[in-house]
Image (cartoon, coloured by chain):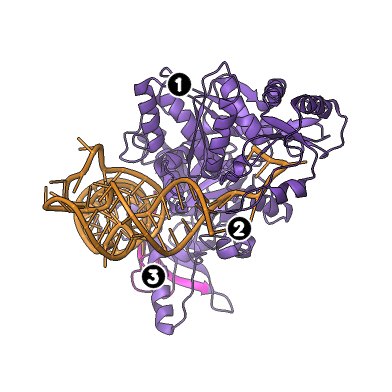
Amino acid sequence: MSAEPTDDTAGSSGDFIRAKIADDNATGKFGGRVHTRFPPEPNGYLHIGHAKAINLNFSLADEFDGRCNLRFDDTNPETEDQAYVDAICEDLAWLGYKPDGGVLFASDYFEQLYQWAEDLVNKGLAYVDDQDPDTISAQRGGFGRPGIESPYRDRPIDENQRLFRAMRAGEFPDGAKVLRARIDMQNENMQLRDPIMYRIKRATHYRTGDDWLIYPTYDWAHGQSDAIEGITHSLCTLEFSDHRSLYDWFLEHLDLPYERPEQTEYARLGLTHTPMSKRVFLRLVETGRVDGWDDPRMPTLRGLRRRGYPPTAIRAFVERVGIARTNATSEIELLESFVRSELNRTALRRMAVLRPLKVIITNWPEGEEATVEAINNPEDPGDGTRMVPFGRELWIEQDDFMLEPPPKYYRLSPGREVRLRAGYYITATHVDTDAEGNVTCVYCTYDPESEGGSTPDGRKVKATMHWVAADHAITRTVHLYDRLFTEPFPGEGGADPLASLNPESRETVTDAKLEPALAHVAPGQVVQFERLGYFAADLDDPTVFHRTVGLRDEWANIQKRRARESSQGGGSKGKGSTGKGSRNNNG
RNA sequence: UCGCGGGUAGUUCAACUGGCAGAACACCAGACUUUGAAUCUGGGGGUUGCAGGUUCGAGCCCUGCCCCGCGAGCCA
């Protein structure tokens, strides 16, 4: 867990939940105890939105010297699976958290829950309803309209007892009866209009098998599970606000030997260009728009991991976003800035050419080879240096050369001298072109006195470029990613979110030329390709690289601004949200 | 329509019990630079949703209005 408390102006110290806990501690409400929990349902994979909930609950426990549980909210056998339990545990560990008290399950409390339900029946606070779902729904009323009471609402207690036991014993078909709390059909809060506590489902539960034919609903299971575990602060997202009075009602009407936990709601994470819904993710996967739940374009933790996002960056991001009750959407650029700043510190620098253009150094003796020494990470001298082969024929980036350079372009062009990183100064003399006039080869001369990147006369060159020696280059596949959705708010205004899916969210380069040091990279390792961005070796096949995120790219900004200005002059207003034309493609 | 929650730079959040509206990211400019990166310095940006009221003084308190989100699963 994060060792040092980030004394930031925002976030960690001042949010309303921390204020409430400090207040509870001051008044001795829970005897100074702080016990939180992260309660996922094992019916899907964790995404970046969950990271916010995880970080909140675990860091609260950390800061207040408390505990944080991991409890699977597995009350719906039809959608849940052990595979998800395993995946969630794995992702949680990857993020860097260890739950207190092992892995817990609401399904372990089914018997206790059932006993408590009988208690409510005995008190006349719950009843068996024989009506079908449509009827119950119709009777619930609507906004501003009261509900009407079920004809079974005043069933005698002993009849309810008998029927509820018969439900458990399997005497009725699925859906034939439900157990409802007897609260108030007139309440303006719909959650209190006799909510369902148990439904009959003949489905095999991944943990309890066929032991149960009736399953508790979320509302009936959640608060009681919290109480069993001794949770003090039960945090959830805003859409559960209306459930809070029900949460309290159940707890108040049971003779619990436990302190009553309290529910507090906060806003879920929103991210631009990123719908945060399992439903949308599922469509992406099922329709083949992405390769799977761990596709590097997916906002799932598994996707982000394959993409190369460091867990520390994800944590720093959700911490910075903070906790509030305002529905809010953060810019994805903020997340990316945390990824960059983490990787800038830690990633080794390497050279790779994504779109190769041949350079021939005419005054370099044919057949002669050399190596030059390059720094592994200027941010961390401890990472040392490496030797990189140099030769007469090199690869450089296509957009590092222009026959007719526009203003402010200061890379290579005819007659101009540039520095090859860690190598020599070269000056372009002439080029070969193909039938269409495309440059196919650039001829240069080099200055032998410029070895290592400087000359005795101390003359300056404006540009430093990356390169790879042609004879020693390894050829690799590199995936370049752009936003998965072009619109900042996919699905806004009732649109289909998939309508703004970016058809160019992945560009695959199969003949990237990499320096030989990149031949053996550990799966998942992230390196910086100098001047291009951060790239992660694939988890399964480390000869394939995924672009984690590009470097900031001022030249791309200049070009974008020019394009915008000229198109405004021309009267067309393009949205240009895919950031095409940028080598680093940061959007 | 009813209930609950919310509205402070482009975005996310601050502003102790009423006392000069700030930070980060983004954007722009400059410095530095063997990554057009990083780093450093500076800058533009706000009628605190609107209208009244209380007060010497309101983002904060009061009244009315507007806008946004959530809520009528035997999902969570």
Instruction: Please name the residue that numbered disc 1 is placed on.
Output: A66
Secondary structure found at label 3 = helix
Q: Over which residues does the magenta segment extend?
A: A403-432
Q: Amino acid at mark 2?
A: Arg
In the shown orientation, is residue A213 left or right of residue A63?
right
Q: Which chain is orange?
A: B
| Residue where numbered disc 2 is placed | A506
Residue at 81%, 27% (x, y): give it. Answer: A168
Q: Position of residue A232 (x, y in %)?
A: 49, 24
Q: What percent of the width, then of the height, locates residue A216?
A: 71, 32
Judge left or right: residue B3 versus residue A417: right
Kindly indicate whether the residue at mark 3 contacts the one at mark 1 (C-beta within 8 angstroms): no
Residue type at mark 1 is Gly
Q: CA distance from mark 1 to mark 2?
A: 44 Å
Q: What residue is rendered at 84% in x and 34% in y?
A: A202
Q: Dot 3, how many residues are within 10 Å of its Cα: few (below 14), some (14-19), or many (20+)?
A: few
Q: Secondary structure at mark 2?
A: strand
Q: Earlier in the sequence, mark 3 or mark 2?
A: 2
- Tell me if label 3 and label 2 are in contact, CB under 8 Å: no
Task: State whether the magenta stretch is mostly helix, strand or loop.
Answer: loop
Of residue A67 and residue A338, the one placed in the foreground of this image is: A67
Label 3: chain letter:
A
Query: What chain letter is assigned to the residue under label 2?
Result: A
**Residue A447 belongs to magenta span:** no
* A142 in relation to A241, above or below: below
Q: Is residue A303 visible?
A: no
Q: How many marks?
A: 3
Instruction: Quickly name the residue at label 3.
Output: A561
Do marks 1 and 2 share a chain?
yes
Mark yes or no: residue A197 visible: yes
